[in-house]
Image (cartoon, rainbow, N blue to C red):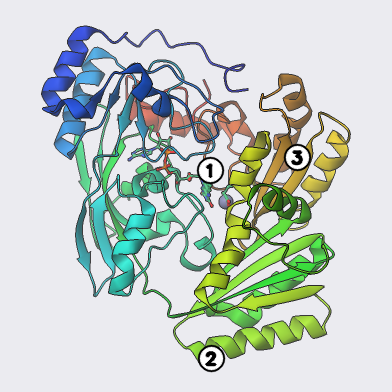
């Protein structure tokens, strides 16, 4: 679909030439940071889903903020368009070129600079892989405030640039709440140092927030300071099954009431998700003796084993006695906990293996939350051998609606059955067409479903101020 809908190349931009490459080699002072070999370019030119394809002839991998600054200054003067790229795990086509934009990869900027064990603030380069930060923090008794299935590849800079949510948002809040400071480079090469490590800092406009969630369109994030919480020492996970979505909602209400501060995740998946995981993950096992319509994965974590255990047990006894669950099981050892989480975290990968996936990342009010899945099932019944499934961060009101078809190729006609219907439905119910994945290249023309004209106008003027030549991640976020 991405290519079927490709926007025209903006003729404000120059074409890359040999002289440019020489300049970049000089700036980088090291050939390994300048990639022009066709084979080596491939991975940078397509996204994680292999859905969006660009045609960049150059990848630059700077090692310092100063190099990022010199690169952008030159690109701005030469009108060369640039796409910042982190771990390239984004799901909306934001991290790959649409045409021939230069890829600016943060891969080689991956140092941890400082950790304050009193405040818990960690200062590091934007290119640090999320999981490596977790590995650094764990022995120090701290943890990263966000967790997502792509943790082995995504970078903290990419997480900030997309304001990634994930499974712990319910407990610790979003990147907007957890990033204390940002160092970023503007399109003209200006280095903006807002790398505060302070929790409280009301000195005028909170500029760092502009970079968080702006998907590389306003600046390149080079360093971050993140607030990291103490790592819980007691973790328990329950996997519950339900016959109706009403029960899922009741379980959530009770979890918030009865588990309160120790509740650290509340995720749901429908039966189709379990089926696709069982089909594509050889190590995955059917969790119960029978099959159910819905599954809830609930995690509690705290610092008092006995207290947390008792609290979870009394919650489970209560919801079982009140017949809110059909079956349930729970785990306290790390191996079983990991196994439960695998069931949830490998849904995306399994769907990827099953064929072409049409992904919708929606915020919806609870009364419509699963209704859209049912409505979509009816709409697509018997069409293209499709399978409709719903899962996600129900505790945060965020549904992942995925539609899978066995053929690898995306189909324009089939897409027409889904869109714009899904966006109109979401807008009608005051939801969001992008809860946590961003707009990227996928939803630029849909932005109006979740933003008013005046809000889009203000976004445009911010973009104009920060990147007057539009070189940073063109064709993304704002409508073309
Ligand atoms: P990329 O994909 O490389 O880039 C994403 C966007 O950010 C692009 O627009 C890019 O230009 C920009 N960008 C990247 N780095 C920088 C930088 N340093 N400065 C400026 N702009 C930059 N997302 C969630 O929110 N929650 C989830 O639970 C979740 N689970 C996922 C599970 C799987 C298996 C996969 C594949 C993806 C998942 N995602 C999830 C989506 C994705 O992982 C996140 O959006 C992640 O934050 C992207 O990080 P990245 O480093 O890969 O960024
Ligand atoms: C998740 O929560 C990710 O697992 C991916 O945000 C969601 O694949 C998806 O639709
Ligand atoms: Zn998600």
Circle 2 or circle 3, nearest the eye: 2
Residue at 80% over, 75% down:
324
Front one among 184 and 345: 345
Provide the secondary structure element on which disc 1 rests.
Answer: loop
Left or right of 21? Residue 156 is right
Disc with the residue nearer the chain's start (2 vs 1): 2
What kind of element bears circle 2?
A: helix
Instruction: Decide if residue 317 is in sight here.
Output: yes
Residue receiving disc 2: 307
**Residue hosting label 1:** 437
Residue 425: give its label. 3
Q: Which of the pair 118/201 is nearer the observer?
A: 118
**Kind of element beneath mark 3:** helix
Q: Earlier in the sequence, mark 2 or mark 3?
A: 2
Classed neighbour count for the residue bearing mark 1: other residues with Cα under 10 Å, few (<14), some (14–19), many (≥20): many
Residue at image position (64%, 46%) is 362
Determine crowd level at label 2: few under 14, some 14-19, many 20+ residues with C-alpha closer than 10 A. Answer: few
> Are there few (<14), some (14-19), or many (20+) residues within 10 Å of tag 3?
some
Which residue does the image show at 51% across and 31% down from the upper left? 93
Q: Position of residue 434 (x, y in %)?
A: 58, 42
- Where 185 sits versus 345, above or below? above
First of labels 1, 3 by sequence position:
3
């Amino acid at each position: 679909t991405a290519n079927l809908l490709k926007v025209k190349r903006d003729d404000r931009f120059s074409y890359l030439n040999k002289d440019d490459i020489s300049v970049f080699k000089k700036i980088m002072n090291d050939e390994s940071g300048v990639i022009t070999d066709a084979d080596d370019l491939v991975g940078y030119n397509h996204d994680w889903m292999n859905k969006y394809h660009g045609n960049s002839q150059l990848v630059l991998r700077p090692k310092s903020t100063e190099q990022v600054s010199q690169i952008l200054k030159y690109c701005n003067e030469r009108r060369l368009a640039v796409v910042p790229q982190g771990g390239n795990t984004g799901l909306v086509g934001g991290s790959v070129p649409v045409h021939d934009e230069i890829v600016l990869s943060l891969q080689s900027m991956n140092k941890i600079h400082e950790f304050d064990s009193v405040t818990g603030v960690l200062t590091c380069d934007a290119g640090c892989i999320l999981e490596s930060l977790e590995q650094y923090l764990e022995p120090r008794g701290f943890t990263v405030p966000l967790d997502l299935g792509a943790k082995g590849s995504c970078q903290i800079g990419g997480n900030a640039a997309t304001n990634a949510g994930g499974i712990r948002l319910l407990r610790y809040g979003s990147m907007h709440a957890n990033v204390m400071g940002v160092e970023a480079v503007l399109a003209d090469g200006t280095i903006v140092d807002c790398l505060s490590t302070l929790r409280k800092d009301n000195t005028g406009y909170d500029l760092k927030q502009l970079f968080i969630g702006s998907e590389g369109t306003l600046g390149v994030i080079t360093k971050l300071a993140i607030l990291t919480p103490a790592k819980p020492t007691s973790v328990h996970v329950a996997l519950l099954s339900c016959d109706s979505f009403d029960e899922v909602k009741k379980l959530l209400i009770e979890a918030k009431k009865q588990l309160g501060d120790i509740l650290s995740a509340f995720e749901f998946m429908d039966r189709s998700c379990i089926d696709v995981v069982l089909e594509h993950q050889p190590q995955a096992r059917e969790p119960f003796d029978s099959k159910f319509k819905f599954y809830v994965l609930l995690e509690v974590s705290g610092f008092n084993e006995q207290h947390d255990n008792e609290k979870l047990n009394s919650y489970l006894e209560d919801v079982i006695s009140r017949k809110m669950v059909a079956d349930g099981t729970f785990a306290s050892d790390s191996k079983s906990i990991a196994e439960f989480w695998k069931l949830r975290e490998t849904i995306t990968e399994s769907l990827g293996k099953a064929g072409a996936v049409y992904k919708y990342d929606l915020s919806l009010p609870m009364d419509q939350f699963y209704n859209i899945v049912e409505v979509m099932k009816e709409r697509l019944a018997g069409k293209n051998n499709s399978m409709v499934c719903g899962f996600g961060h129900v505790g945060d009101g965020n549904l992942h609606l995925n539609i899978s078809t066995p053929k690898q190729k995306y189909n324009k006609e089939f897409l027409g059955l889904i869109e714009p219907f899904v966006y109109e439905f979401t807008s009608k119910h005051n939801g969001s067409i992008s809860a946590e994945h961003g707009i990227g290249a996928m939803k630029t023309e849909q932005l109006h479903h979740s933003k008013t004209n005046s809000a889009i106008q203000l976004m445009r003027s911010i973009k104009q101020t920060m990147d007057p030549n539009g070189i940073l991640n063109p064709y993304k976020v704002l409508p073309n």
